[in-house]
Image: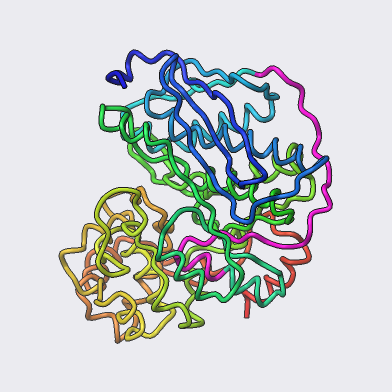
């Protein structure tokens, strides 16, 4: 392979994609200019699959949508100004959705690399949109699990609502597998192998950084749902995910944009209009804040020894913590703080192995969560107002008020805040826009309010 010079690349190509029903393997092929092809594979277990008629056509539409969205991992290596699709044509609606995913999903990547991607990624429109048909999909949910508290809250809520579900994850994480097995529900582990050439490009100086992983995983699970013939793809993204980091001089940059409401709404509506009319994509926790999710999780200790939200466990490359929680990253900080108002201190310290709020050296990390002299971290964490309200609640409790960072908050930060910023109850209200099917939402609303 000749040396890669990102500045000399002029075009990114979506070369072709195919799905083999006899093996369950999807192949997604990309290239820069006339360079070597890069092939990603996605494997849906359970082959061979019988796909015919309208469902086979829907699988093809879902495959192309996945091809376009998953290409973000490769496009970002050079971000060329020209883009082409070699083997099929797309309509204006599809182009608009995918362009939105690239612009907003690469927002943090662009900010960190000093790039302006506005108007840069444009897809050719050469086809007319066709409305999707209902396929007669069976009532069953593929529920994404990531190993953290949120998906476990969703899984247990669906169980109580008598929704048949398969716990689904992508990739080879043993921590996620152990968590999934703990649910006792049917499991679906989808394989995903990035093109090895991408790692070589990174070594040669390609642009690199954060991509909208949830958008890619959503497209993978839509394909899997149609292959399996089921009618729901369920994620566990709460309303707090819609709010990004406020960067001075730049504005809002949302690390978790594809976990937010704007992506869920656009993607879910597109799937129903253009892929399969009876396939429902939604987040079960969208009407809840991060604190409301934490309150739900704290109601049972069944997963205490199995879950982890520490992202260091899930890096493709690099060091992983010996235990399930590193204790020093923004996710560890936030989950500890969010759970603290809702569970006994002894239980929380047992989960993490130590009391993160009694470590003065971690003040900077918690300040970022509080948006005190810093912006919200580029991580999947709650809003600053949630962290401030949680810390204020702890400052009023005898068992927490003497801990180093709680005392620091009470003396240094709390006096600068308005009284309404210290109340946790308004943040626990279950409300807001969502795509949850109406009959299910009525059952869930009562369940979450209990």
Residue 350 image-quadrant placement:
bottom left
Classify residue 25 as left or right of residue 439: left
Foreground pick, 221 / 418: 221
Q: Residue at x 30, y 86 (%)?
A: 398
Q: Residue at x 50, y 51 (%)?
A: 191
Which quarter shows the N terminus?
top left
Foreground pick, 369 / 356: 356
Residue 15 place in picture, x, y as percent? 55, 23
Query: Is the residue 371 above or below the residue 396 in the image?
Result: above
Magenta residues, as a range?
A: 125-153
Q: Residue at x 58, y 60 (%)?
A: 188
Query: Is the residue 171 above or below the residue 308 in the image?
Result: above
Query: Looking at the image, which residue sits at the far left?
Result: 361
Residue 84 image-quadrant placement:
top right
Query: Is the residue 29 above or below the residue 420 in the image?
Result: above
Classify residue 125 as left or right of residue 182: right
Residue 52 place in picture, x, y as percent? 80, 42
């Amino acid at each position: 392979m000749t040396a890669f010079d990102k500045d000399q690349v002029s075009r990114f190509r979506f070369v072709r994609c195919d799905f083999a029903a006899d093996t369950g393997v999807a192949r997604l092929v990309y290239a820069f200019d006339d360079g070597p092809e890069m092939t990603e594979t996605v494997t849906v277990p359970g082959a061979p699959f019988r796909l015919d008629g309208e469902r086979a056509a829907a699988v093809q539409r879902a495959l192309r949508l996945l091809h376009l969205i998953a290409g973000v991992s490769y496009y970002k290596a050079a971000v060329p100004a020209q883009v082409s699709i070699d083997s099929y044509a797309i309509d204006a609606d599809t182009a608009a959705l995918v362009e939105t995913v690239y612009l907003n999903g690469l927002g943090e990547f662009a900010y960190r690399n000093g790039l302006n991607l506005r108007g840069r990624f444009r897809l050719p429109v050469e086809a007319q949109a066709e409305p999707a048909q209902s396929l007669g999909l069976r009532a069953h949910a593929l529920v994404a699990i990531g190993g953290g508290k949120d998906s476990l809250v969703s899984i247990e809520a669906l169980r109580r609502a008598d929704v048949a579900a398969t716990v689904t994850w992508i990739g080879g994480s043993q921590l996620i597998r152990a968590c999934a097995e703990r649910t006792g529900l049917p499991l679906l582990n989808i394989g995903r192998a990035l093109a090895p050439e991408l790692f070589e490009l990174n070594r040669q100086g390609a642009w690199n950084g954060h991509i909208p992983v949830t958008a890619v995983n959503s497209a993978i699970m839509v394909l899997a749902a149609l292959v399996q013939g089921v009618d729901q793809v369920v994620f566990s993204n709460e309303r707090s995910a819609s709010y990004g980091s406020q960067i001075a001089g730049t504005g809002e940059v949302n690390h978790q944009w594809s976990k937010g409401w704007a992506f869920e709404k656009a993607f879910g509506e597109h799937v129903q209009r253009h892929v399969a009319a009876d396939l429902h994509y939604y987040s079960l926790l969208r009407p809840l804040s991060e604190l409301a999710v934490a309150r739900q999780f704290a109601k049972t200790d069944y997963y205490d020894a199995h879950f982890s939200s520490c992202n260091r466990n899930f890096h493709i490359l690099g060091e992983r913590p010996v235990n399930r929680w590193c204790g020093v990253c923004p996710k560890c900080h936030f989950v500890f703080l969010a759970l603290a108002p809702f569970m006994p201190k002894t239980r929380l310290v047992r989960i993490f192995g130590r009391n993160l709020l009694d470590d003065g050296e971690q003040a900077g990390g918690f300040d970022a969560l509080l948006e005190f002299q810093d912006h919200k971290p580029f991580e999947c964490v709650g809003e600053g107002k949630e962290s401030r309200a949680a810390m204020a609640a702890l400052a009023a409790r005898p068992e927490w008020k003497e801990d180093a960072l709680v005392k620091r908050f009470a003396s240094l930060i709390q006096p600068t805040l308005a009284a309404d910023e210290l109340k946790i109850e308004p943040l626990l209200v279950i409300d807001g826009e969502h795509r949850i099917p109406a009959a299910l939402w009525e059952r869930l609303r009562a369940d979450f309010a209990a």
